[in-house]
Image: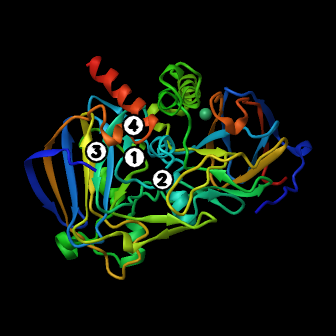
């Protein structure tokens, strides 16, 4: 898929088991890089101008007849609009149906590591991470939704059984998200809730912000499905109306 | 897997028919058994559950899928909340498979899925929004309208990561039944969808039935 990035505006790294958030302006490309392999980035999206508009995993999946997320896919809000589109992806499969790790889940699998004892090497979980970031914008438990888990591959068997596939996570893999609307992004680098690793997986993630080109008429995400053409038409109307 | 219920509608404490395109909101108490009947077949009952004592705790499709390690719902599935608690358990089911991936239809998603001109067609999320607006006593708003269950819908996932919308496995008189593990607010939109071949473009009524714990 053709690159849509131009200038590098910013780069940073976040250790495993941390959380952060920012508002990305329309036209920005966010590149996430799985530095060592095995990373997980939990992510949620909201419209900063109307926080009631948020990422809708069911609409995203059913509009595009897909269970996984990869290049060519658009990430939809509940209002039929595209928050961002996946313009490049060397990982190939990202999960959006398995949700988040919780405090009890992490304690059960990897033991309890309090902040008092371990300081910043404690074992933070995805659910609490989202609650902290959400609260910065006046959001709470009622506003959490099905999130994306970048770099985590979970496939299904014929009978619907879920299989977490560690082969999906390769060192150096990246995914590029072009933001097609201004978007509030909440994210964490806590383990995927189905990660079977023996030790709490504390995998760093690099991210870069680039200036990007807006989706052209022949943009591969816009043309990958007729549905996405209509999603971009909804964005067009939204931006016309200011 | 399917399993017949031993309960007779004659002993039910509550029965109501919900026409296509209408909503139903009601509290089902812990221990009560709650049945949804697909009266004419291939209808979708788009359903949400909330903890009646704390509606911020609600049905979570992602926690349910992950905790049972399967994307389909059926007999034995425990419907999990956002706080990791079992809200209800499916105890009888004559269909064998229900969807919780596909979500509820909305006017906005209809524009994307079908055509921009479909934007003013009645959809499930309209029913949900009317329900919470007309029932302020539950304290619910749009922020509470989340990822639901589609009872009687069949949405197979392929091993390659595709999602398909197959013909329903349901038929006239088929039902799904669950026992509540806590007091739950049940919010159903009986889907008015006119664009989806799953229901042969013909949305039809459902019946809801409740039995007391002792039944
Ligand atoms: Zn519907």
Q: Nearer the viewer, residue A100 or A119?
A: A100
Q: CA distance from mark 4 to mark 3?
A: 20 Å
- For label 2, the crowd category at 10 Å Cα-Cα, with few meaning under 14, some 14 to 19 and many 20 or more, is many
Chain that bears disc 2: B
Q: CA distance from mark 2 to mark 3?
A: 17 Å
The structure residue drawn at horizontal position 49% and vertical position 48%, both measured from the top left corner, is B57
Residue to which mark 3 is pinned:
A135
Asked if marks 1 and 4 touch (Cβ < 8 Å), the reply is: no
| Res B82 label | 2
Residue B209 visible here: no
| Res A77 label | 4
| Relative side of B9 to A54, left or right | right
Q: Nearer the viewer, residue B33 or B194?
A: B194
Asked if marks 2 and 1 touch (Cβ < 8 Å), the reply is: yes
Residue occupying the far bottom of the picture = A198
- For label 4, the crowd category at 10 Å Cα-Cα, with few meaning under 14, some 14 to 19 and many 20 or more, is many
Q: CA distance from mark 2 to mark 4?
A: 20 Å
How many numbered dots are placed on residues in this image?
A: 4
Q: Which secondary structure lies at badge 3? A: helix
Residue to which mark 1 is pinned:
A144
Instruction: Say which of marks 1 and 4 sits in front.
Output: 4
Residue A234 visible here: yes
Residue A54 point in image, percent of width and height:
37, 38
Chain that bears disc 1: A
Q: CA distance from mark 1 to mark 4?
A: 13 Å
Q: Nearer the viewer, residue A67 or B148?
A: A67
Same chain, labels 4 and 3: yes
Dot placed on the residue nearer the N-terminal end, 3 or 1: 3
| Relative side of B92 to B142, left or right | right
């Amino acid at each position: 898929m053709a690159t849509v990035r131009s200038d590098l505006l910013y780069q940073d790294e976040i250790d495993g088991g941390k959380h952060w958030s920012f508002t990305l302006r329309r036209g920005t490309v966010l590149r996430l890089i799985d530095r060592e392999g095995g990373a997980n980035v939990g992510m949620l999206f909201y419209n900063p101008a109307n926080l009631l508009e948020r990422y809708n995993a069911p609409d995203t999946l059913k509009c595009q007849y897909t269970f996984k997320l990869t290049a060519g896919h658009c990430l939809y809000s509940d209002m039929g609009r595209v928050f961002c589109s996946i313009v490049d992806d060397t990982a190939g499969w990202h999960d959006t149906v398995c949700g988040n790790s919780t405090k009890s889940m992490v304690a059960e699998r990897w033991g309890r590591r309090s902040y008092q004892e371990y300081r910043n090497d404690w074992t933070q979980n995805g659910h609490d991470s989202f609650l902290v970031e959400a609260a910065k914008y006046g959001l709470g438990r009622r506003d959490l939704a099905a999130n994306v888990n970048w770099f985590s591959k979970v496939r299904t068997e014929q009978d619907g059984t879920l299989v977490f596939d560690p082969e999906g996570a390769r060192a150096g893999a990246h995914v590029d998200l072009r933001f097609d609307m201004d978007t509030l992004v909440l994210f964490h680098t806590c383990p995927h809730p189905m990660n079977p690793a023996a030790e709490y997986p504390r995998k760093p993630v690099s991210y870069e912000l680039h200036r990007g080109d807006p989706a052209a008429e022949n943009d591969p995400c816009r043309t990958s499905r007729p549905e996405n053409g209509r999603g971009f038409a909804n964005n067009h109307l939204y931006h016309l109306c200011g | 897997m399917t399993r017949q219920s031993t309960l007779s509608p004659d002993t039910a404490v509550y029965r109501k028919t919900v026409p296509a395109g209408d909503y139903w909101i009601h509290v089902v108490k812990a221990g009560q058994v709650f049945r949804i009947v697909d009266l004419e077949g291939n209808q979708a009952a788009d359903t949400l559950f909330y903890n009646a004592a704390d509606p911020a705790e609600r049905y979570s499709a992602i926690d349910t899928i992950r905790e049972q390690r399967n994307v389909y719902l059926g007999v034995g599935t425990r419907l999990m909340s956002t706080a990791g608690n079992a809200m209800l358990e499916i105890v009888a089911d004559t269909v064998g498979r229900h969807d919780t991936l596909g979500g509820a239809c909305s006017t906005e998603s209809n524009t994307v899925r079908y055509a921009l001109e479909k934007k003013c067609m009645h959809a499930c999320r309209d029913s949900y929004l009317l329900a919470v607006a007309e029932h302020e006593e539950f304290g619910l708003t749009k922020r509470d309208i989340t990822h639901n269950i589609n009872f009687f819908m069949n949405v197979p996932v392929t091993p390659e990561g595709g999602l398909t919308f197959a013909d329903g496995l349901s038929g006239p008189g088929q039902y799904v039944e669950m026992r509540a593990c806590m007091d739950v607010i049940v919010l159903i939109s009986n889907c008015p969808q006119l664009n989806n071949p799953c229901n042969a473009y013909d949305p039809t009524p459902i019946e809801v039935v409740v039995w007391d714990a002792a039944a």
